[in-house]
Image (spheres, helix red, strand yellow):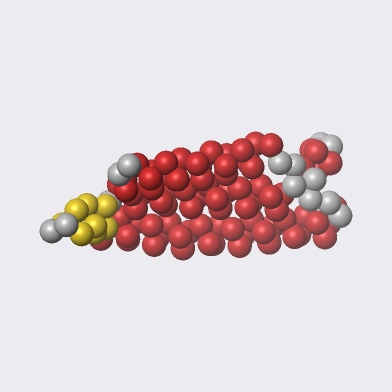
Amino acid sequence: MNVYELYFGTSIILIVLGLYALISRRNLIKIVLGLEVMTLGVNLAIITMGIRVFKGAYEVDALAQGMVAISMAIGAAVAALALSIAMNIYKHYGTFDIRKLRRLRW
């Protein structure tokens, strides 16, 4: 088994687990966590695509590292914003359940 296959397989598993958490869960906090797991899977896939072998050692391309660093910063900001919105929803409505929040439409 190749290093590329192992990392790329792990990234696919993380993406599928995050997508499952987004689709199946009804709790806002768990949905945000699923989004973060999916982001980690995408970051691992980007890093995997940037791996190259140079003189018998594995190296990661600087462009891939830069893309993942920017993605991590944006992901942290998105997670903080989503969690703050979820906390405001809980303060106002007293629940994290999306089914109950859907009933509050006009």
Q: Is residue 2 above or below residue 33?
A: above
Q: Nearer the viewer, residue 9 or 49?
A: 9
> Could you tell me which quadrant the C terminus lies in?
top right
Relative side of 18 to 1, left or right: right
- Where residue 52 appears, as percent x and y from the top left, is 22, 52
- Identify the residue at horizontal 69%, vertical 37% (top origin): 24
Does 59 appear above or below 13?
below
Q: Nearer the viewer, residue 94 or 42?
A: 42
Query: How far from the left and from the top, in percent, is residue 101?
Result: 80, 43
Q: Is residue 10 visible?
A: yes
* Residue furthest right as drawn: 94
Residue 100 falls left or right of residue 85: right
Residue drawn at the location 55% of the way across and 50% of the way down: 37
Question: Residue 59's spot in the image, x, y percent?
Answer: 24, 59
Q: Residue furthest front?
A: 1
Q: Is residue 63 visible?
A: no
